[in-house]
Image (tube, rainbow, N blue to C red):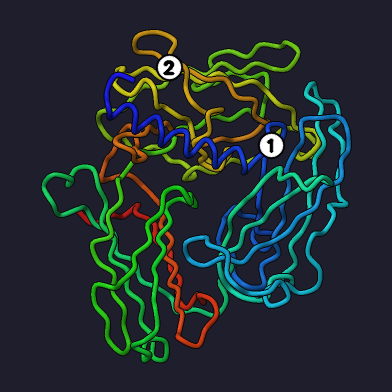
Amino acid sequence: MRNFKDFINYLFTLFFFSLSLCAQDENIASIEIINQSNNSKNSIFLKGDLINVRFDELSNKIKNYYYTFEHCDYNWEKSILFKNEFIEGFDDIRISNYQKSFNTLQKFINYSFNISNKKLKISGNYILTVKDKFDKEILKRKFIIVDQYNIGDIQISRAKANKIIDTHQNLKVTFNCIECFYDNNADYKLLVIRNNNYNDCKIINKPTFKTSKKLIYDNVLFEGGDEYLSFDTKNILSTSNKIKKVLNDKIYNTILYDDLKKMIYSYNPDKNGEFIVNSNNNNNSTDSDYTLVKFTLNKESDFDENLFIVGGFNNHDLNEKYRLNKLSKNKFGIELKLKQGYYNYKYVTIENGALKNISNFWQTENNYSAILYQKKQTDRYYKIVGFGEKNSFKIVN
């Protein structure tokens, strides 16, 4: 290590790497959690939504997989509730719906199952775990169930402090409620999530102001970040203004044009990190093929040991698998096997032990979700009593 700063960054990377190793098997890909009620991808669902979970295993052998749930508090610590207090019926259920890929160079098995609107009985944070018959975890995903709640108002503005006025966004979150806030002994926590990324969130322990009918959380600061980059491999052999070349080998190879670190903000419509499996085939789940996508980033070499590529496609994980390799003095790259479709992605780094976007602009369009938790002295778990969403497209200067 060149110095102490590098050593701290190295330890921080190992920490995230160890977490990611427990979260997903190497051969598991294209994990999707879809709200069947409106066919959208989200990690926050209303009580009554039908949730579909699907994923691929890059193998031609069908296996037995089982899924379980854990109920958690606002900080993803397991609650003390018994299973029958938050789950209707049985847990540890075998996934019985699976199909083999059809007419693809990359062979895989597509697994899917539904979480019915009656399965999860109470609001809160949940961890979904899929295991094999040997009880080995192959994937984990977080999501939130919201039941009856008060609608939160989120105001987004440019940060006020001169040092961060060009790079940060400021949130003011307000919850109005007649009955929720009369108990002065209750504990309230606010969780703010950006772009459905649980690695990009903040927990606020105390409100800035509190009355009998209102809770206000002010000066909640986030780096603005930058718009996600994107490409589309729906037509797997076609090039575009983003796809430079496509090669046909044992599997397809898609070579993207080089990405550049942006110094000036420019609006680029995106889906805030989402990925959508899509192809010109009858069944996107089984007929969409995989392609080895080559990413290249041109930038200065000051973060060369800690550059990662993230997006919804990899759950924004800082896993060693997603670390960029240094190709030359100012060029970094990575190759990832991805299923046909539309992908958002961005590059991030670790600086002084914290996650950092490589570019930050106050104008960036982001989507924020605010979840308010309450725990009275007589409660055994944190209940969700407030929820709100806001996009920063029309941010106040």
Q: How many marks?
A: 2
Tell me the residue that label 1 is attached to: 25
Where's residue 34, x and y in %?
66, 54
Q: Against 163, is 154 above or below?
A: below
19 or 153, nearer to the observer? 19
Kind of residue at badge 1 = Asp
Q: Against 230, is 94 above or below?
A: below
- The answer to whether the residue labelled 2 contacts the one labelled 1, judged by CB atoms less than 8 Å apart, is no
Indicate the quadrant where residue 219 lies.
bottom left
Indicate the quadrant where residue 191 lies.
bottom left
- Residue at x 55%, y 43% (from the top left corner): 315
Q: Against 121, is 13 above or below?
A: above
Considering the image in quadrants, where does the N terminus appear? top left
Task: Measure the C-alpha gap from mark 2 to mark 1.
Answer: 25 Å
- Residue at x 54%, y 44% (from the top left corner): 274
Kind of residue at badge 2 = Phe
Q: Earlier in the sequence, mark 2 or mark 1?
A: 1
- Residue at x 42%, y 31% (from the top left corner): 347
Where's residue 348, x and y in %?
40, 33
Indicate the quadrant where residue 239 lies.
top right
Q: Is residue 166 left or right of residue 395?
A: left
